[in-house]
Image: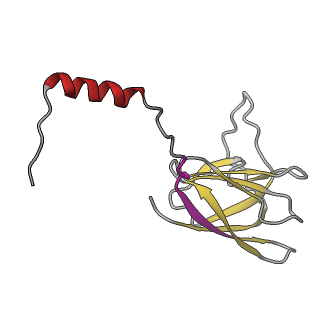
């Protein structure tokens, strides 16, 4: 087989012709991972499930319609956030957000601090409501 060489002017014309053609855009799906969870609250039946999450975005899920707790898990930052519309709840020391490393097992507590101006010198103990277990793919 013989290879063809183009003259520099022919090469420039070919590049110009290719640049004028419309580019086809490829819409690839963003990468996802599976987040498995189990929510065990005192006085309620345990709930387990799985949700598909996008790698670059926080994953929001509501495990139980009864408790109405919503969790937001950020895999990249190893951050977990809880929202409880019908009661005050927290993930430890009265915080609604925690940095949890692997986030395998996280306690859920009753009550919440709202980060006022005054800082308490003693940590309050909050009654435990239950536990959230998480399992996800590692980055």
Number of on-image labels: 0
- Which quarter of the figure is the C terminus placed in? bottom left
Query: In the displayed image of the protein, which residue is found farthest to the bottom?
Result: 45
Q: Quadrant of residue 91?
A: bottom right
Magenta stretch holds residue 93: no
Q: Residue at x 78, y 47 (%)?
A: 112
Horizontal placement of 129 versus 139: left or right? right
Query: Based on the displayed image, in which of its 4 quarters is residue 20 positioned?
Result: top left
In front of the other: 107 or 36: 36
Q: Residue 53 location in percent, x, y?
A: 61, 57
94 or 124: nearer the eye?
94
Q: Residue furthest left?
A: 2
Residue 70: give x, y in percent of width and height. Answer: 77, 55
Q: Which residue range is magenta in the image?
A: 27-37
Determine the residue positioned at 82% across, 66% down.
64
Q: In the picture provided, is 50 more to the left or to the right than 20?
A: right
- In reply to whether residue 28 is colored magenta, the answer given is yes
Q: Quadrant of residue 21?
A: top left
**On-image quarter of the N terminus:** bottom left
* Image x and y of residue 17, in percent: 35, 27
Q: Is the image coloured rainbow, by chain, by secondary structure, or in one colour?
A: secondary structure
Determine whether 9 is above or below 114 in the image: above
Q: Position of residue 66 (x, y in %)?
A: 89, 65
């Amino acid at each position: 087989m013989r290879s063809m060489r183009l003259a520099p002017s022919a090469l420039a014309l070919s590049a110009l012709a290719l640049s004028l053609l419309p580019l086809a855009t490829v819409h690839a799906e963003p990468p996802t991972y599976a987040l498995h969870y189990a929510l065990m609250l005192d006085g309620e039946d345990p709930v387990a499930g799985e949700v598909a999450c996008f790698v670059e975005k926080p994953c929001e899920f509501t495990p139980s319609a009864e408790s109405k707790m919503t969790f937001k898990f950020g895999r990249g930052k190893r951050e977990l956030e809880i929202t409880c519309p019908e009661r005050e709840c927290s993930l430890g020391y009265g915080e609604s957000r925690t940095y949890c490393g692997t986030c395998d097992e996280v306690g859920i507590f009753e009550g919440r601090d709202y980060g006022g101006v005054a800082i308490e010198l003693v940590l309050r103990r909050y009654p435990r409501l239950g536990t959230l277990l998480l399992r996800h793919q590692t980055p």
